[in-house]
Image: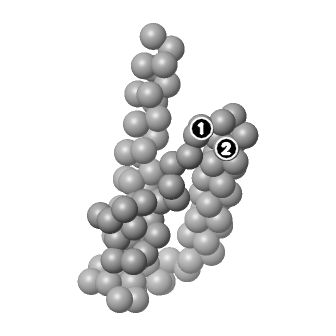
């Protein structure tokens, strides 16, 4: 991974700046909005398309969506650990 979180010229993560309460609220809101958009998109996906291959990938939508769910659960676990450590 290159400088500022970029890889192959693509921007993956924004640069980390001094944390503020306003920046935190903005990040949380952006995360919630992205999650809500994902849920709506998946809800609109017909079951008949779950077996279709994801364009440019070697797997279908069914397996991709399971991976997305596992990824979100992984990060939820990280957040739970951080909250627990902060409370201690």
Question: In the picture, which quadrant includes the N terminus?
Answer: bottom left
Q: Residue at x 48, y 19 (%)?
A: 86
Q: Is residue 22 left or right of residue 66?
A: right
**Res. 23 image quadrant:** top right
**Res. 9 image quadrant:** bottom left
Residue 75 versus residue 9: which sits nearer the camera? 9
The CA distance from mark 1 to mark 2 is: 7 Å
Query: Quick check: 86 above or below 54?
Result: above
Q: SS class of the residue under badge 2?
A: helix
Residue 54: tell me if it is visible.
Answer: yes
The circle on residue 50 is none
The circle on residue 19 is 1
Residue 54 versus residue 80: which sits nearer the camera? 80
- Residue 37's spot in the image, x, y percent? 65, 65
Q: Is residue 73 left or right of residue 20?
A: left
Q: SS class of the residue under badge 1?
A: loop
Q: Residue at x 45, y 10 (%)?
A: 88
The circle on residue 23 is 2
Does the CB distance between marks 1 and 2 fall below 8 Å? yes
Residue 39 versus residue 22: which sits nearer the camera? 22
């Amino acid at each position: 991974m290159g400088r500022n979180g970029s890889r192959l010229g693509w921007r993956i993560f924004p640069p980390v700046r001094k944390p503020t309460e306003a920046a935190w609220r903005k990040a949380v809101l952006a995360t919630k909005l992205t999650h809500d958009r994902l849920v709506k998109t998946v809800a609109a996906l017909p079951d008949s398309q779950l077996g279709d291959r994801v364009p440019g990938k070697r797997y279908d939508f069914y397996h991709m969506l399971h991976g997305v769910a596992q990824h979100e659960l992984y990060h939820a676990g990280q957040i739970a650990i951080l909250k627990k450590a902060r409370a201690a």
